[in-house]
């Protein structure tokens, strides 16, 4: 019997309702094999507890340090992104932490940057300015001292707006850059269909930024522009 764990549904950033094929009673199985010979197996089913097994030839793992030593890999998985909330309110820390890497990440964008250190925001602002000319973005803040509503302003050609008032392409671009900043060059980036809302020029820029920042990435795309850019760079 392999050593394993029961994984709480609350820690899984996807809905499990449709995780099995054609509503089968069989569990959906994910298997990851590292080049060092160690294997992770995850079994999912909407009506059963999620199970996580490790095939390592070692004793039962009881610390994150042991796990990282046996599985020396850092995955950065970019969630599906959408337009920002029209009126984003200040949320509790746990709500922000729980949603920032899920399909609800667009709903906590202001809250996320409100909490990030100033040095990280400065790096983010610089990356935005490099990739989108004539844009200067400001750190989120409360609209007034007496409200829980947040605002995040940006300036373009001397006109100041809330980021929600920008086009969907710019909104998603800000979120993509935010996600990419979660990890370093040794991480493996996994990103699925980041083409929605992005102009072809931005699609090419995204490929360049990813290739400059990561040694390895996995991207699913139907974009001819991304395919061309990947070959050209």
Image (cartoon, rainbow, N blue to C red):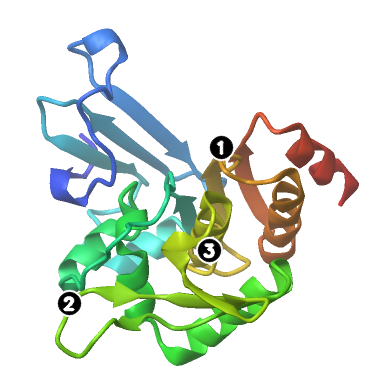
Q: Residues within 10 Å of mark 1 (few under 14, many from 20)?
A: few
Q: In the image, is residue 222 above or below residue 204?
A: above
How many numbered marks appear? 3
Q: Residues within 10 Å of mark 3 (few under 14, many from 20)?
A: some
Q: Is residue 87 left or right of residue 45?
A: right
| Residue 47 found in image quarter | top left
Query: Disc 2 versus disc 3: distance between alpha carbons?
Result: 22 Å
Residue shown at 30% from the left, 63% from the top? 108
Q: Nearer the viewer, residue 91 or 99?
A: 91
Q: In the image, is residue 232 above or below residue 93?
A: above
* Residue located beneath label 1 in the image: 193
Q: Which mark is residue 174?
A: 3
Q: Which mark is residue 148?
A: 2
Residue shown at 20% from the left, 51% from the top? 11
Q: In the image, is residue 147 above or below residue 55?
A: below
Q: Earlier in the sequence, mark 1 or mark 3?
A: 3
Residue shown at 42% from the left, 50% from the top? 83
Query: Disc 1 versus disc 3: distance between alpha carbons?
Result: 16 Å
- Dot 3: element: helix
Residue shown at 22% from the left, 14% from the top? 26
């Amino acid at each position: 019997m392999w050593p394993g764990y029961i994984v709480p549904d609350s820690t899984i950033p996807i809905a499990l309702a449709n995780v099995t094929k054609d509503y089968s009673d069989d569990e959906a199985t994910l298997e990851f094999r590292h080049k060092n010979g160690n294997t992770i197996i995850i079994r999912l089913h909407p009506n059963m507890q999620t199970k996580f097994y490790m095939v390592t030839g070692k004793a039962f793992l009881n610390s994150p340090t042991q796990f990282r030593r046996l599985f020396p890999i850092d995955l950065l998985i970019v969630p599906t992104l959408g337009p920002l909330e029209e009126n984003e309110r200040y949320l509790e820390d746990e709500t922000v932490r729980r949603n920032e890497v899920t399909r609800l990440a667009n709903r906590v964008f202001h809250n996320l940057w409100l909490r990030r250190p100033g040095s990280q925001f400065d790096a983010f602002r610089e990356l935005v300015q490099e990739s989108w000319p004539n844009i200067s973005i400001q750190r989120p803040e409360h609209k007034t001292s007496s409200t829980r509503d947040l605002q995040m302003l940006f300036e373009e050609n001397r006109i100041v707006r809330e980021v929600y008032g920008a086009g969907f392409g710019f909104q998603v671009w800000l979120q993509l850059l935010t996600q990419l900043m979660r990890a370093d060059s040794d991480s493996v980036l996994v990103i699925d269909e980041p083409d929605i809302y992005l102009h072809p020029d931005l699609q090419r820029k995204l490929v360049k930024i990813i290739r400059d920042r990561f040694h390895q990435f996995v991207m699913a795309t139907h974009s001819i522009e991304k395919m061309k850019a990947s070959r050209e760079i």
